[in-house]
Image (spheres, rainbow, N blue to C red):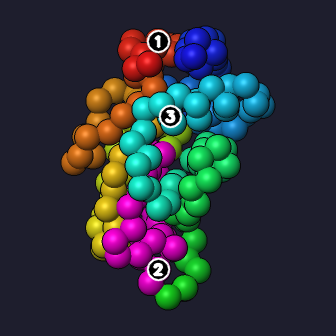
Amino acid sequence: MLDRLVESLETCPMVKRGEYNYFIHPITDGVPIVEPALLRDVCTAMIKMLDLNKVDKIVVVEAMGIHIGAVLSVMTDIPMTVMRKRVYNLPHEVAVHQSTGYSKGELYLNGVYKGDRLVIIDDVISTGGTMRALLQALEIAGAEVVDVCFAVQRGTPSIGRPYKSLVRIEVTEKVHVVERYL
């Protein structure tokens, strides 16, 4: 099931951003093109890994979690909400600061309420900064995080709670898939 993901990661282009080796991949960047079969494989694998029992909502982070979350929402009939990078000033909006290895800024959570049971999904985890910010926002909102899953895990970052991933990679001059979890 993960063969297509592994092959696409191990052959994807690389760029340097300062000292950071950055891989460019359809699931994590949306370029050069997102093939439906690859996206379907990722979402089907996530459904097998996630605890979706009595989950009220899927939570994703702008931008690259959106396409995975949308397909997962359609496949499971679980509504989705997006943690955004801009303020909407809606009632109950939760704002938190995010800091990763390559960006900083505010994130805004809407549509999550006390007692909601949620799963979080995202494209990649590398530093854990975005997830720590999202988990903080969900705690402020009073929601219960049932499960967390990433398509790609780079290294072994800590987010203060257990999480799942489809594959774990190491990045040098290219991507090496070092572990598959399905």
Q: CA distance from mark 1 to mark 3?
A: 21 Å
**Is residue 125 a member of the stretch shown in magenta?**
no
From the viewer's perspective, tell me whether residue 102 is left or right of residue 141.
right
Kind of residue sitting beneath label 2 = Glu
Magenta stretch? 92-121
Q: Quadrant of residue 88?
A: bottom right
Q: Considering only vertical position in the picture, is 107 above or below 51? A: below
Circles 1, 3 touching at the beta carbon (< 8 Å): no
Count of all numbered marks drawn on residues in the image = 3
Helix, strand, or loop for circle 2? loop
Question: Which residue corresponds to the image point at 64% horizontal and 43% vertical from the top-left?
Answer: 75
Which comes before the other along the chain, label 2 or label 1? Answer: 2
For mark 2, what is the residue?
A: 93
Q: Quadrant of residue 41?
A: top right
Kind of residue sitting beneath label 1 = His
Looking at the picture, how far across and down is residue 105, in whole percent? 46, 63
For mark 1, what is the residue?
A: 176
From the viewer's perspective, tell me whether residue 33 is left or right of residue 90.
right
